[in-house]
C-alpha cells in the first residue's frame, strides 16, 4: 500500500476504538465506521491515537484493529505508535507497516523539555524505526505538556527526513502554520504536510493559513471535508458557513476529558457505533449532558441535512 | 456602596486596562468603557483581573484605576487582589473597599495542591482580609494549574462565610455547576452566586445549568446579557441563537495568550479604546490575524445589528 | 506464597531490570541481584517500578522477569502494575499474583487532580484487581505530578481495604509520616505499612518518625537495612553515622533522570550487573560523571568496609 | 559602586529577609546578617531572591532593604527584580542601581516555553533595563518550571551582552556546567560567571566542573566559602571533607517549601536573626522538625567548630 507523503491533503479521520458493553473491541462497529469514513470523503484514516484509547489496548488488540481496517479500506492508514520505550515503538511499527499502514504517528513523552531534547528524541525515534517509515510529528501541547516552537519543528524536519507530516494541534496555532510555511518558502525546512487537530476548532482559518487539511476525530467528518474543500477552492464564505453551523457542537465535543464520551455518543446516535462504551477509567456523560448534545444535534439538523439520527 | 451578595446575578464585565501607546493608563478610554458597560446592561464590573493586566500595574496605578471607575458608576465593582503574600492582598483590599468596591476576587497561587491546602489558603485569605469583605473565589485551572473539585468548593463555602461568589471557569465545567447546585439543595453548602468565565465559551448551557450569569470580558458583553436574560426567562432557542451567532468570534478571542490582544483590537474597532496597546511583555496580532477578526466581525454584523465599527 | 500485610517492615529493594548491551533482559544478572538482595538482609523485593524501566518492557518480558525472581527467592515480591487502563493492570496483576507475587503497586496517572478523583481512581483500581490482591499506594509527586495530602491517603486507606502499604516518596515528607501515624492513633484510618522511597534521602529521620522501613533502589541496600535496624532498636547515633557516610553517594544517585544510570553503574562496579545498559531513550553518564562516582565510592570505602569493587 | 562582571567568583550569600513577630522588616537583624556575611568571607550578597520572600514585599520595603544593605557593606550586591511586567522590573532596577547595586537578577515567568521565547524574554528584559545594567540569568527549573538547555543559555549570552552571570540551579546540573564551559572554549558564547544555587547540594562537584562559586542561602555560608576555596586550590579531599560534614543539614534545609523555615530557624539559633518569622502564607516547623535540626546541628558541631549556638 502507498506510503504517506509530504503532499498528503484532505481529511484523515481519527477513528475511535469501538468497544462493546463488556469492554471487548467491537469489530462490527469498526467496519461500519471505516465504510462511513470512505463515504464521507475522507482521504485517510488514523488509528490508535490518544482518543482511540490506544494506551488501554494490548499490543495484540492494537495490531488486530489495524489489520482489520487495512483489510477493509484502500485509504492510507496512519497508526499511533507512541510508547515510553523505542523498543515497543519499533515492534508495533514493524507489525503495522508490514500489514500495510501508510505511516506512524509519535507523540512526545510529557516530560520532554528544551528544543535540543525534543529534536534528539525524534532523531532517536527515526533511528529506532528506520528511514523508510513515514513519520507524523504530533504537536499537542495541551495534552502532552510539550511545546514546540516553529523553529524546533523546522529542525526536526531538517534532521529527520522520514518526518513527512505535522499533526498540528497547538492552541493558539494559526501563526505557527504561517511561520512554518514561511520557513518552507525561505528554504529553511523541507515541505511537510500539515494536518490540523484540536477537533477542528480553528479549521476555518487553518485551511486559509496554508494547512493541507485536518486530522481529527470530530463526529461529523463531512463538515471537515467540506471546509477543506471550500478553502482549497477559495470559497471562503461557504467554508465559514458550514463551519459555523457545526461550531456549537464541535466546541461541546472539544471539552478535555469528556470529549471522547461526546464523540462516541453522537456516533452511536448516528448509527455508527453499537455502543458508546469506553474502557475504564473513563469520563461519562450525565443525562443532562446527553440532553444538551441532543439539543445541539437538533439545532444543527436545521442547517445541515446530513444530520440523521437513530435511537 | 452596596456589598456583593450571594444573590448576585447577571453579567459582571471584566474590564481590560486601557493603555496609551507609551504604556500609561488611559483614563479617558477607561471612562468610556465604564459608560459602555452600563449602556450594555451589565450588572457589575470587575477590575484588575488576569486579563486586566493587573500584575503589570503598580499598587498606586491599581488603586487609581479602581477609584476612577467607582467615581463614574454606581454599579457594583469587584476588584482582583491576588498577591503572593497576604499582607499585599490586605493592603490593596483595604484601599479598594474604602473607596467603595463591592468585593474582592482572589485566585489561588499556582503551586497550591491538595484539597486541604486549598481550603487552608482561603481560610488564610479571609483571616487576612477580615470577615466583612465579600470574597470571590476564582476557579480557573487552565490558567492557574489549580484544580478544585465541587467538594472542595463546598468546603470553602462552609469554612469561609465571606465567600459569596464563585467565578467559575473550569473546563469542562457544566457538571461542576450541577454538582454545586445539588450540594446547595442538599444543605451541604450555603448558596453562592456562580458567575461563569472562560470568555463565555459555554455560557449557553451554563445559564441553563443554574449559573447566575457571567463574569468575563468577551468584547460584546451585550451578547452575554442577552443569553443570561433569555435563559432566565426560559427562552432557550433565542438564547442559543444569539450565542451561536457570536461563537465564531468568541472562540477566536478565547485563545490562550493572544486572547487579550483580540479583545483589545475589537474594542478599539468598536470605538471604546483609543489604543489596543498592552504593557510588555505581551502577545501581538499579525496583520493576518487582524484580517481574520475583521472577517468574523463582518459575518457577525449580518446577524447582530449592534456590530458598529469605527476605523 | 505469603501476601503482603499491613505489618510489613524492613527494606524492600527495588530492583533495576538488567539488560545486556543489545537491550535484551539479562536473566543471569537478575539472578545475581536477587541473591545479593537476600544476602544484604532485605525483607522483600520490588520489581517493575519506574526505575525498573517497566514502561519499556513488553507484557511477556514483565511476567517472565517476575516469574524468574519468584522461582529464585522466598522473599515477598511486590510488582509494579501501573497502566493507563484498568484492563491491562488487571491482566498483569492476574499473571503475577498467580505466579506468587505478594502484592502489586499502582502509581496514579499524572493528570489526576483533586482528592475526590484520587480516591475514585484507587477505588476503581481495587474494583478492577479484586479485594484479595494487596495493593501498594505509590505517592511520588516529583515524578507523577500528583500530590496526595495525608487526609486523602486516609480516605483511600478507609475506602480500599486491600490497600495495605504506602510507598512514601513525597518531598518534603516527614510531617506526612507523623500525620498518618496520628490519624491511625486517632482511629481515623486503619494501620498501613509505610515504606519510604526517594532513594532513602531522608530515611534517617523517616525511620524515627514512624515509617516501617524503606522501599527504594539505592545501590547499597545494606545501608538501608542498617538504618532501619538501628532506628528500630533506638540506636540513633549509629543510624545517623552509617547514613551520613552514604549520603554523598546517595545524593548523587538521587538526581532526576540520570539517577538510574548512576545506580546501574555502581551495581556494575559492585559486580552485580554484567552491564549498566538501559533501554532507549535513556540518560547516560559522561566519563567525568563516572570519575565523580568513583571518587565517592573511594571515599565511602574508607567508612564502610562493604565497598568492594570490581572492574 | 563596582558593577558585577563576567569574572565574579566566590560566594554570593542569598540573604533571607528578617521579619519581626508582627511581620515588619527587622532592620537590626538585617544589619547583623550583613556583618556576618562579611566576616564569613563571602564575595557578594544577593537580596530579594525567591527565598528572600521578595514577592511578599512592597516596592517601598524592597528598596528600603536594598538601601540599608548598601549603606552597611562595600561588597557587591545583586538584587532580584523579577516581575510580571517589564515596567515594574525597570522601576525597581532603576531604584536599586541608583542606590549602588552591582546588578540585578531575573527569573523567567513560569509559563515560558520553547527556546525562542526564552531568548526573546531576556532580550526584552535587556531592552527594558538598558544595556548598562549587569544581568544575572536565574535558571531554576524545579521552582520556575522553565527548563533551559545549555544551547539556549549560550544564545542568551550571545544576544544579551549585559548578561554576565548565570545563577545555576538546574537539577541535575553538572553536565550543564561542563557544556557551557565547552561552549566558551569553542568560542560559541562569551564567558559568563557561573554561581551555583540549590542550597549548594552539588557544590563539591560543581566547583570542580568549572563553576566560579556559589550563590545560595545555606545557613552556614562558611562551608560554601571553604568548598569554593579548596576547589580553586585543588584541595579536592579537603573540599569534600567539609562539604560532607555539612551535607546532612544542607539536605534537610534543601526541602522544597519548608526549606526557608529551616534556614531561618538555624540562623536564629546562630544568633543572627532575632526571629524566624515569615510573612503569610508560609510553611512552619513542627517541634519534631526543630528537634531534628537540633540533632543535625549537634552532630555537625563535632566536625565543624564554627557551630556555636544560642538559645
Image: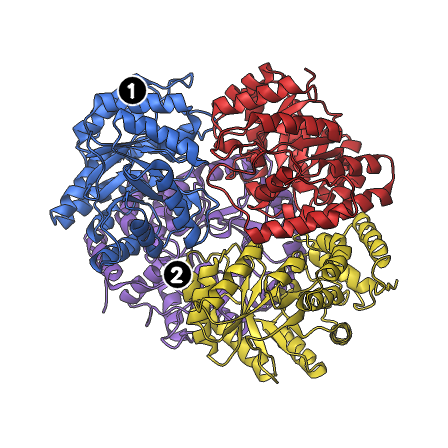
Chain colours: A blue, B purple, C red, D yellow
Based on the displayed image, in which of its 4 quarters is residue C232 positioned? top right
The chain carrying label 1 is A
* Residue behind mark 1: A29
Q: Residues within 10 Å of mark 1 (few under 14, many from 20)?
A: many
* Residue behind mark 2: D116
**Front one among A17 and A267:** A17
**Front one among A192 and D282:** A192
| Residue D238 point in image, percent of width and height | 75, 61
Relative placement, left or right, of B243 versus C29 is left
Relative placement, left or right, of A241 versus C302 is left
Q: Is residue B94 visible?
A: no
Q: Residues within 10 Å of mark 2 (few under 14, many from 20)?
A: some
Extreme-front residue of the structure: C311
The residue that appears at 64% across and 66% down in the rendered structure is D215
Classify D221 as above or below B240: below
- Quadrant location of the N terminus of chain D? bottom right
- Quadrant location of the C terminus of chain D? bottom right
Relative placement, left or right, of D129 versus C157 is left
The chain carrying label 2 is D
> Can marks 1 and 2 be said to lie on one chain?
no
Relative placement, left or right, of D190 versus B157 is left
The total of numbered circles placed on residues is 2
Q: Is residue D158 visible?
A: yes
| Residue B234 point in image, percent of width and height | 35, 39
SS of the residue at dot 2?
A: helix
In three-dimensional space, the C-alpha distance between marks 1 and 2, rounded to whole angstroms, equals 46 Å
Tell us which disc is closer to us: 1 or 2.
Answer: 2
Based on the displayed image, in which of its 4 quarters is residue D242 positioned? bottom right
| Residue B24 point in image, percent of width and height | 42, 76
Amino acid at each position: 500500500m502507498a506510503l504517506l507523503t509530504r503532499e498528503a491533503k484532505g481529511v484523515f479521520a481519527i477513528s475511535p476504538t469501538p468497544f462493546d458493553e463488556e469492554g471487548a473491541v467491537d469489530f462490527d462497529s469498526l467496519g461500519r465506521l471505516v465504510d462511513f469514513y470512505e463515504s464521507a470523503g475522507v482521504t485517510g484514516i488514523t488509528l490508535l491515537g490518544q482518543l482511540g484509547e490506544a494506551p488501554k489496548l494490548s499490543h495484540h488488540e492494537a495490531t488486530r484493529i489495524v489489520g482489520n481496517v487495512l483489510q477493509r479500506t484502500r485509504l492510507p492508514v496512519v497508526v499511533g505508535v507512541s510508547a515510553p520505550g523505542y523498543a515497543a515503538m519499533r515492534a508495533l511499527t514493524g507489525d503495522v507497516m508490514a500489514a500495510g499502514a501508510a505511516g506512524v504517528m509519535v507523540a512526545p513523552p510529557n516530560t520532554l523539555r528544551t528544543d535540543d531534547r525534543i529534536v534528539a528524541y525524534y532523531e532517536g525515534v527515526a533511528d529506532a524505526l528506520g528511514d523508510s517509515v513515514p513519520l507524523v510529528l504530533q504537536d499537542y501541547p495541551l495534552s502532552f505538556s510539550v511545546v514546540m516552537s516553529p523553529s524546533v519543528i523546522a529542525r526536526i524536519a531538517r534532521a529527520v527526513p522520514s518526518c513527512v507530516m505535522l499533526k498540528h494541534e497547538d492552541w493558539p496555532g494559526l501563526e505557527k502554520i504561517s511561520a512554518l510555511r514561511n520557513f518552507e518558502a525561505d528554504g529553511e525546512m523541507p515541505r511537510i504536510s500539515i494536518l490540523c487537530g484540536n477537533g477542528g476548532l480553528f479549521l476555518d482559518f487553518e485551511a486559509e493559513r496554508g494547512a493541507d487539511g485536518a486530522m481529527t476525530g470530530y463526529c461529523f467528518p463531512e463538515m471537515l471535508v467540506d471546509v477543506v474543500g471550500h478553502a482549497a477552492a477559495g470559497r471562503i464564505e461557504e467554508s465559514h458557513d458550514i463551519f459555523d453551523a457545526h461550531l456549537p457542537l464541535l466546541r461541546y465535543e472539544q471539552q478535555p476529558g469528556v470529549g471522547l464520551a461526546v464523540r462516541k455518543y453522537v456516533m452511536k446516535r448516528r448509527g455508527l457505533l453499537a455502543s458508546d462504551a469506553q474502557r475504564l477509567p473513563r469520563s461519562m456523560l450525565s443525562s443532562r449532558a446527553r440532553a444538551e448534545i441532543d439539543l445541539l444535534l437538533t439545532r444543527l439538523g436545521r442547517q445541515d441535512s446530513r444530520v440523521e439520527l437513530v435511537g
